[in-house]
Amino acid sequence: MSYNLRVMTAVTATFYCAFGGGGAFIGLFLKGLGASYMQVSLVLTLFISTTIVASAVYGRYADRLGARRAWLAVGLLLLAIAYVLIARSQTLAQAAGARVVEGIGAAIYATISLSIVGDLLSGSPERGRQMGVYRGIGSVAYAVGALIGGRLADRSGIAASLIFAAISVGSGALLAARLHPGPRPRPTLTSALEAVVESTSPRSTAAARTTLPRIFLVGVILVMAALSASSSMFPLYLNSLGRSRTAIGSLGALTAVLEFPAMYFTGILSDAIGRAPLLAAGAGAIALVQIFYIGAARVSFSVVLGQITRSFGYASFTANAMSYTADLSGENDRAANSGLFTLMQNVGQLAGMLLGGVLAQLLGFGALFAFCAVTALCAALAFYALSRSHPHHKATPN
């Protein structure tokens, strides 16, 4: 593992540790400010909306803004500031404003990080396994953060877990500043929105034909919609079942710990048989998770089964979707495809978070999870269609 890849792995670990330790409890924090499920959903949606806009703006002006490693540090610092602002919020409006800052920081981090890692893994015949290790370590860090954050939230309040998250991403910013400059010129970070327009233009060039397949992007949107609608309301669902914040954090930690070996082995398997079958299997598992969640209202252990299944589903989808994006990208269009992939993730998250709170408020958690199951099944069908249209696609050196 190269020096820069080790540093990026450590940076990603701090990001996911913060997300597990503080970000996962933001919905409960907003509920404590008096927000309804629908209002919680709207504030969470504001974060994703900001991320989409900020990704497009940053991508558009990246050439004028300087080195990627500096802006990676800036993105993480903005996340740290946002967590502190949320922790100090006394009203829903203040928390919403802080989430705008968080969205800007997350957009910069997401746009740059996948592009950098794609560069570092370029040409590797074991990209799936290496991506699994890189992203799997992030999941382990999430588990550590969730355990610490859950205990802090029960003992000292959710604000304490948010301060812990701020410290975590702040340390990530310091690590990002230690990245060595790349050996070749920095690729243009084309706006994700521009990539969408270019890919649909009748005047597309040969380079534009390397844009990610539409059926893949549809699957990404559907999976992220199912995941975000479910996960955004999941802590509130467990809270309604009487689970403590420590228990909620422990369940999140269980899932994240199991994701590491799942990402590693599904990465190895996808290097052998291709990414699309593993993407379809992951989406199908995410659909099954929702059934377990529905059963948790009557059988408490069902939620544990759901989290174990979610580990495989999320791992199989996430690591292989990132690898698939890197596989289809060359040096000149890697950043554009990374931005496009991130944009489609954000679109799915936006739809899911918006619908999650609405369905939970109007129809209850059972209807919410049923909707997520159907959405994930549709994603599995999309990835199955991808496997049929690209049956021999595997990792190939660029």
Image (cartoon, rainbow, N blue to C red):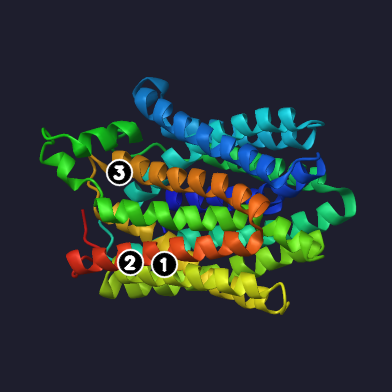
* Residue 121 seen by the camera: no
* Camera-nearest residue between 359 and 217: 359
27 on left or right of 186: right
Name the residue beneath numbered marker 1.
377
Residue 371 percent coordinates (x, y)? 52, 60
Name the residue beneath numbered marker 3.
337
Amino acid type at circle 1 is: Leu
* Residue 51 vertical position relative to residue 314 in the rendered view, above or below: above
Cα–Cα gap, marks 1 and 2: 6 Å
Q: Residue at x 27, y 36 (%)?
A: 195
Residue 254 percent coordinates (x, y)? 65, 70
Quadrant in the picture for residue 26 = top right
Residue 192 percent coordinates (x, y)? 34, 36
Cα–Cα gap, marks 2 and 3: 23 Å
Kindly give the residue lying farthest to the front in the view shown: 362
Element type where label 1 sits in the image: helix
Mark 1 closeness class: few <14, some 14–19, many ≥20 residues within 10 Å: many
Q: Nearer the viewer, mark 3 or mark 1?
A: 1
Cα–Cα gap, marks 3 and 1: 25 Å
219 on left or right of 144: left
Quadrant in the picture for residue 190 = top left
* Residue 304 vertical position relative to residue 203 in the rendered view, above or below: below
Kindly give the residue lying farthest to the top in the view shown: 64
Element type where label 2 sits in the image: helix
Name the residue beneath numbered marker 2.
381
Going from the N terminus, do you reach mark 2 or mark 3 first? 3
